[in-house]
Image (cartoon, rainbow, N blue to C red):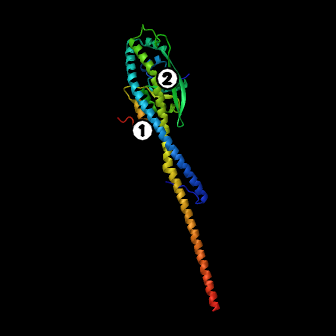
Amino acid sequence: MYKIGVIGPRDQVLCFMAAGFTVYDAETPREALAALKRAKGENCVILYITAPLAGEIEEEIARLSEGTLPAIVTLPDLDSGYGTAQLKRAVERAVGADIIFKD
Amino acid sequence: MAEIKVNPTRMELKKLKARLVTARRGHKLLKDKRDELMRQFLDVVREAKALREALCQQLGSVYSSFASAAALTDPRMMKEALMLPGMQGELLVKQKNIMSVYVPVFQYEAIKASDTGGVGYGYAFTSGALDEAVEQICATSAQLVRLAQLEKTATLLCDEIEKTRRRVNAFEYIMIPQYEAGVKTISMKLDENERGAQTRLMKVKDMMIRAQIEERRAAKNIEE
C-alpha cells in the first residue's frame, strides 16, 4: 500500500498524523535528507517537506524525485512562499518568461 | 554553421533531399508537441497556483490552532492523541500519458477510522483547538494530495518542454539549414558539371565543324 509522508520539525508536522500521514521528524537538512531516503524506501509516493528544509536540500530533492514517482512537494505555508517561487521558476524554465506570477 | 561534407553525386542529392523532408516533418511534429505540452503545462500551473494559495490560507489556520493546542496540552499526551489517526486515507496511484510524458494520477479516498466523528482520541486531556486542527487537516488532505499531483505534473512537463524546445531549435537552426545548404551545394556542383560538359561538347563540335570546313577548303584548292 502506498503511503504519504510528511518531513519537518516535530511541532510543525505532528498534526498531519491525524490525517493518517506518516510523519518523519527532521530538524536539520541532514536529518531531512535521511528521512527522505528512508521514506522513499518505505513506499511513500507523496512526500511533503517543510519549506525551510526543502530550500536547504534542493539539489538532493531534485535528484530523488526524478521519474514519475515519488512526488516531493513543499508544504504550503504563508511565510516563505518557497513553493510558489518553485512553480514560478518552472514557468520561467518552460516558457522563457514568467507569464503567470508576474503580478 | 558547419556544413555537411558529401560527395556531389546524384545519389547523395537524393539521399539528402529525403533526409530534408524527414527533418521538416520531424520539426513540425515536435513543434506541435511543444505547443500542446505548453498548453497543458500552463493549465496545470494555473490550477496548482490557485490550489497552493488556498491551501496556504487553510493550513495557516491549522498551524495556529495546532500551535495553541500544543501550548495547552502536554507533548506526550499530544503525541498519544495523534498516534491513532482519526482518518485513514486510501491512496491509489495510476499513470497518465500526456504527449509521451508519464505523469502520476493520485486517487485519494478519505475513510474515517473511528466512530467518534473522525477523532481518534478522548476529549478529556486535550484542548478544543486540537479538535479544530484535526478536523481542518482531515478536510484539506484530499486537496494536499491533488496539489502533489499537480506540482509533480508541472515539474515533469517543464522538463519535457525544455527538452522538446531544444530539439525543435536544433531542427530549425542546425539540421534543416545544413541539409538545405547541402542540397544547394550539390545541385550547384551538378549544374556546373552539366554546363561544363555541354560547353565541352559544343567546343568539340565547333572544332569538328572547323576541321571539316578546313578539309573541304583544302580539297577545293587541290581541284583548282
B120 over B201 or under it: above or below: above
Q: Quadrant of residue B16?
A: bottom right
Count of all numbered marks drawn on residues in the image: 2
Q: Which mark is residue A92?
A: 1
Asked if badges 2 and 1 are on one and the same chain, I answer yes
Residue B181 x %, y %: 51, 56
User: In front: A59, or B3?
Assistant: B3
Judge whether B90 appears above or below B171 on screen.
Answer: above
Q: Give the mark nearest the N terminus, 2 or 1.
A: 2
In this view, the residue farthest toward the bottom is: B224
Q: Position of residue B212 (x, y in %)?
A: 62, 81
Residue A30 in view here:
no
Q: Residue A91 in the image: x percent, y percent?
A: 43, 36
Q: Nearer the viewer, mark 2 or mark 1?
A: 1
Q: Chain of mark 1?
A: A
**In this rendering, would B54 be left or right of B177?**
left
Q: Which mark is residue B222?
A: none
Chain under numbered label 2: A
The residue positioned 55% from the left and 60% from the top of the image is: B187
Distance in Å between CA atoms under marks 2 and 1: 29 Å
Asked whether residue B183 appears in the rendered view, the answer is yes
Residue type, mark 2 in image: Gly
Closest to the observer, B99 or A32: B99
Residue at image mark 2: A5
For the residue marked with disc 1, what is the amino acid? Answer: Glu
* Marks 2 & 1, CB-CB < 8 Å contact: no
Secondary structure state at the residue bearing disc 1: helix
- How crowded pointer 2 is (Cα within 10 Å; few <14, some 14-19, many 20+) is rated as many
